[in-house]
Image: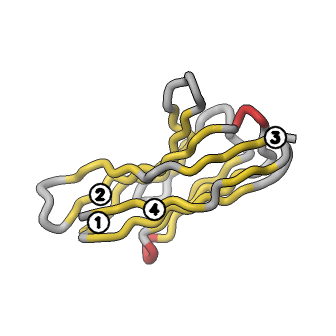
Amino acid sequence: QVQLVESGGGLVQPGGSLRLSCAASGSIFSINAMGWYRQAPGKQRELVAGITAGGNTNYADSVKGRFTISRDNAKNTVYLQMNSLKPEDTAVYYCNADIVSIGHWGNYAYWGQGTQVTVSS
């Protein structure tokens, strides 16, 4: 089985920074695209940033210039560096990975457990 474990969330002041990590483990054959989503109470889950296996990235307009997504294929890990954080960035952040698993037919989207990010004075 495949599991995604997130870490790095917490409470920061506006203008501060956090670095989220999401490590995939298990019977992994290959990992395609990876990404970060977030969901605030009462709001829809939205894509924050995505990165392809080839390193192409895309970002939500609200985080462009402030957030950077990256990946370490040797560690099966995706990161989200968040700078210049704003209160409106407060949400539960979920990582996602499109993975081809050993013993699994075709690719499948896996989700992390979520990590809380709170930006407040």
Q: What is the secondary structure assignment of the residue under circle 1?
A: strand
Q: Quadrant of residue 43?
A: top right
Q: Residue at x 64, y 55 (%)?
A: 9
Please state if 88 lies on the left or on the right of 43 as rendered. right
Q: CA distance from mark 2 to mark 4?
A: 14 Å
Disc sitting over residue 5 in the figure: 4
Q: Name the mark nearer the viewer: 3 or 2.
A: 3
Residue type at tag 3: Ser
Where is mark 1, residue-wise? 30
Pointer 4: residues within 10 angstroms few (<14), some, or many (20+)?
some
Q: Earlier in the sequence, mark 3 or mark 2?
A: 2
Q: Position of residue 66 (x, y in %)?
A: 74, 46
Q: CA distance from mark 1 to mark 4?
A: 17 Å
Pointer 2: residues within 10 angstroms few (<14), some, or many (20+)?
many
Residue type at tag 4: Val
Where is mark 3, residue-wise? 120
Q: Earlier in the sequence, mark 2 or mark 1?
A: 1
Q: Vertical placement of 92 versus 31: above or below? A: above
Q: Residue at x 22, y 53 (%)?
A: 107
Where is mark 2, residue-wise? 99
Q: Quadrant of residue 14?
A: top right
Please state if 81 lies on the left or on the right of 35 as rendered. right
C-beta proximity under 8 Å, tags 2 and 1: yes
